[in-house]
Image (cartoon, grey):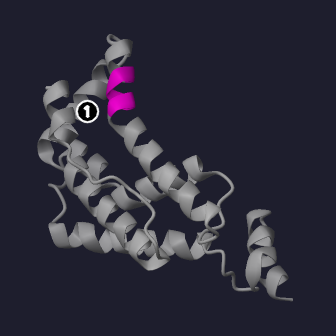
Amino acid sequence: MFERNIKAIRLPDLAVGPDPTSSLAQLAEFGRLLVSFLTRPEIVRTASVMAACADENPRLAAAFYAAGPGTMLKKVAGFLKSLAKRGVLSIDDPEFAAEQLIVSWLGLSQLRQNLGVAGPPSADAIARRVRYATDTMLRAWSSASLAGGKAGAAQRRRGMPRDAITK
């Protein structure tokens, strides 16, 4: 079951394009495809079984994480790091930012499915959620800050309130 599900995921590579707009659209499409895959009933069941058996099979659980969630996290983190190097985004920790973005894409969809209180989200609901989460995170990470330039972005990263930045 584990091997079959790993082979079933077909996500495009994330490569920063020549312009930020196409790169960011590619990120949103990647997110849409990822959430569509991760909320398929058979994938939700597999993840649930893996979590339930992790204590008994720690090597299999580690392999599952590395091949699935770990690989996706690395792809998104590498993509965000590339955008940060180009000055499109202001991110100090691309891996943590990628984790935040992926969790925002998924929301509580998998938990609701595991609890049996909901089925998989519709394609339209997934597209809306991913676009909203992506847009929200990108605004937060934008190198063009409300206060203007990198100084404002650096102040926000240090946790200064927005009104302190604009004063």
Tell me where residue 81 appears, x and y as whole percent.
57, 55
Say what amino acid the circle numbered 1 marks: Ser
Indicate left or right for 69 with 20 as reference.
Answer: left
Q: Magenta stretch: residue 79 in it?
A: no
Please say whether residue 20 is visible from this viewpoint. yes
Tell me where residue 18 appears, x and y as whole percent.
46, 72
SS for callout 1: helix
Q: Residue furthest bottom?
A: 167
Q: Residue furthest front?
A: 18
Please say whether residue 160 is visible from this viewpoint. no
User: Above or below — where is 24 with respect to 95?
Assistant: below
According to the image, label 1 marks what residue?
Answer: 48
Residue at 28 percent of width and 63 percent of height? 32
Q: Quadrant of residue 42?
A: top left
The N terminus, quarter of image: top left
- Give the magenta-colored segment's residue range: 62-67
User: Above or below — where is 87 with respect to 1?
Assistant: below
Tell me where residue 90 appears, x and y as whole percent.
66, 66
Q: Quadrant of residue 23?
A: bottom left
Residue at 25 percent of width and 33 percent of height? 48
Q: Quadrant of residue 63?
A: top left
